[in-house]
Image (spheres, helix red, strand yellow):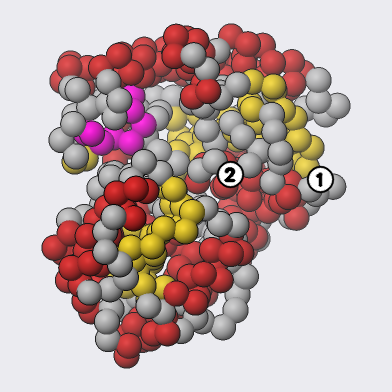
Amino acid sequence: MHAAILTNFATPKGGAEKVAIESARGLAERGVAVTLIHGVDGPADPLLDHSRIRRIGLGLTDVWERPAWRGAIDGIWNREAARRLEAALAGLPAGPDVVHLHQWTRSLSPAVFAVLARSGLPVAVTLHDYFLACPNGVYYRFDAAEPCALRPLSGSCLAAPCDPQSRAHKAVRVARSLVQRKAIARGFARRPLDLVHVSDGSRARLEPMLGATVFRHHRIDNPVRVERAAPADPARGDAVAFVGRFTREKGADLVAEAAHRAGLPSLFVGDGPLAAELRAVPGAEVVGWRAPAEVEALLRARARAVAAPARWLETGPLTVYEALAAGIPAVASDRAGAGEKIRQGETGFLVAPEAGSLADAFRRLKDDAVVRTLGRAAHARYWAAPMTLAAHADALCDLYAGMTGGPRAPSFQRSAVM
């Protein structure tokens, strides 16, 4: 088996790249030959240093770093990305059996769908967000600070001032969505795209939006690259932790406000537009981005719980899974896909993404006995059915086998594929 994995970057700029890189490593360790093709050149994650992984950079530019007019054009349809991807696939000594696309909006553009359709190869796409259906990618009304309820690309959608930046940006995103929809409908009428959903909630929302005409839908958990160790003792921690990009749709401001109300410090690992606002909240500490090993050590030392109270319909935040794997309770939004892994009152809490409800949950974390019991249950339940890199690779191999007609993995090795 030879799998080509396609994404924007060879280093984690977000959850999509993180999963693409980790899945490449997991597949390589399972004996699969992997070619990772990334749009933007630059340093590569050390996980890609493996004898079965070939890495090809297309030498493209992140559209966020281009002049606005050029970024808009390339974001809608990047002809150079299409040309270079086609050349890269044609130049491989042995062609791939399957192509797996993880993200395309930052450098590759919808033009890659036309290239992949012409290749005749089976194509899988992991849906880390809502870009395949929704113009702004998160199915969220930034103007109203609430999840969207409109049908993507309907008249109401086109008229809604929902973009996080401006109406001009919305117009560009709509144009991208329209040409993307057309490219997929034309290119995959005879060979469907295989779509991988990372949570039951996101599948339930996206499947009706996308339909089944040119898609086949599957469900596979994202991998969690955490080595099994003794559970943390969260009762020794002093703070509620938030890990990731500091934005309102992710609820970073809610964590700071709710922790302050509950009389607990808050710890923020990452960065984002709300960094200065968070630093101004009494009891909040912002430490910036850290390497994965540093994040785990910091959470084990400081976190009474990890909070992810997203306002948007988040598909599956990895930070929640990583916390549970370490034996740290999680407090998540009842809108997020990660909530499917939390047992209410047993391994953490699911709450509405608003400060009052979150503060009530945080107050319960002030009890050492409660926190310690939650943490132990979180560790035990996670490791009873861990979302390991090996389990993820097995699930991908089963998916690829179904797409290509090859042999499937033994049933005892499979992860959640439905």
Task: Give the residue number, with chain letter if any, for mark 2.
Answer: 12
Is residue 381 among what the camera can see?
Answer: no
Q: Does residue 293 lie above or below 162 as drawn?
A: below
Read off the residue under disc 1.
Answer: 52
Residue 400: percent from left, percent from top: 62, 41
Which residue type does callout 1 highlight? Arg
Residue closest to the far bottom: 369
Q: Quadrant of residue 238?
A: bottom left
Q: Find the magenta span and give its range.
A: 134-142
Asked if residue 293 is among those painted magenta in the image, a careful observer would answer no
Left or right: residue 363 versus residue 1 is left
Q: Specify whether 60 is left or right of 242.
A: right
Secondary element type, mark 2: loop
Left or right, 95 with respect to 6, comes to right
Query: Residue 241 at x, y = what percent?
Result: 38, 65
| x 56%, y 24%: residue | 62
In the image, residue 395 above or below residue 173: below
Give SS at disc 1: loop
Residue occupying the point 53% across, 23% down: 65
